[in-house]
Amino acid sequence: MINDLIEKRKKILAESEQHKNRRNELNASASKFARERNTLNNQTREFVEEAQKNKDLRDKYNQEVIELKVQRNELNDQANALFEEIEIFKKEHGSPKNRGIKEIQKQIDHLDMMQQTQVFSTEKERELIEKIKQMKGQVKEQEAELEQNKEMRTKVTAARDLRKQASDLHAKVTEVAELAQKHHDIMVDSYRKADKSRESADTGHRSFVEAQEAADSEHKFFIACQKELRDYDKVISGLRKKTKKVKVSKEQKAVRKEAEHLFKNFRAGEKLTTDDILLLQRSKLI
């Protein structure tokens, strides 16, 4: 019976080792998934911070664009007001030109914007540049006529200066708007990377949880096997003690029987050896 129990205990021990090894493997996998998840979470945080930084810069530059446009429009309004006065002067003094400086300048601004924002064939773009050049020449001609009058010369100079300042501000508007767009694009790209990184981190976290739960399950099986091994050890130990007691009891009975035989012979007059005397003493017969 003890041998059967020992064989069963060996099987439980092997099963316990399997669960322990599997638990350790799963815990190692869970730790690996946790490290990868944490790395991805850190990356996500960095991407979000980068996105927020560029969002702030984009908003800053967009606000600057708004302010520059206000300044540019104010300068253009001031220039237009002067050109209005110049047009009135021309009409009052019978200027022979067909169109006023203000109208021509509006056309020039319109054509400049078309050249900057639209795609033309090489031939078409040359025609557009030539047209702008001709119109600028018309402006200069009309301004040259007006400059013959001292008052108008002062207004033309002021109007030119205002228009130049407005043009410089417009170039600045374009430059700052491009910066705002640049940071907007970086912001969008950073948020996209953050979403991708966060998705990978979530996948890694799910893998971590699955591995950890499986490791916990294997640990429970391991603990159950350990408890069963202790139970087997108690039973086997108890049976061994009982077997030992039975063996000792049998030996004692045999010794007692032999001692009684020797004692009977001694009383009948037989001589005893030293070993016989020791045996009788151990059996408490003498």
Image (cartoon, rainbow, N blue to C red):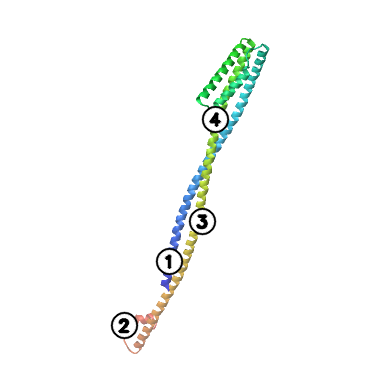
Quick check: 238 above or below 174? below
**Of 114 and 261, which appears nearest the observer?**
114
| Mark 1 vs mark 2: in front | 1
Task: Residue under label 4, please give it.
Answer: 178
| Foreground of the two, 43 or 277 | 43
Horizontally, residue 31 falls left or right of residue 255, namely: right
Q: Assign a secondary structure to mark 4.
A: helix
Q: Nearer the viewer, residue 211 or 179?
A: 179
- Which residue is farthest front? 123
Label 2 sits on residue:
273
Labels 1 and 2: the sequence-earlier one:
1
Q: Residue 94: x percent and y percent?
A: 66, 11
Quarter that holds the C terminus: bottom left
Q: The residue tagged with tag 3: helix, strand or loop?
A: helix
**Residue 169 appears in the picture as rendered:** no
Tell me the kind of residue under disc 3: Glu
Give the Cα separation between the discs numbered 1 and 2. Answer: 54 Å
Q: Is residue 9 visible?
A: yes
Would you call the spot at circle 1 few (<14 residues within 10 Å), some (14-19), or many (20 or more)? few
Please name the residue shown 60% across and 20% down the image: 105
Q: Amino acid at mark 1?
A: Lys
The answer to whether the residues at label 4 and label 2 have Cβ atoms under 8 Å apart is no
Residue bearing the label numbered 3: 213
Cα separation, mark 4 vs mark 3, equals 52 Å
- Per the image, the residue denoted by label 1 is 11
Q: Position of residue 39 (x, y in %)?
A: 49, 45
Taking depth in this image into account, of 6 and 168 the one nearest to the observer is 168
Q: Residue at x 34, y 88 (%)?
A: 265
Q: CA distance from mark 4 to mark 2?
A: 123 Å
Residue type pointed to by label 4: Glu
**Within 10 Å of the Cα at label 3, are there few (<14), some (14-19), or many (20+) other Cα atoms?**
some
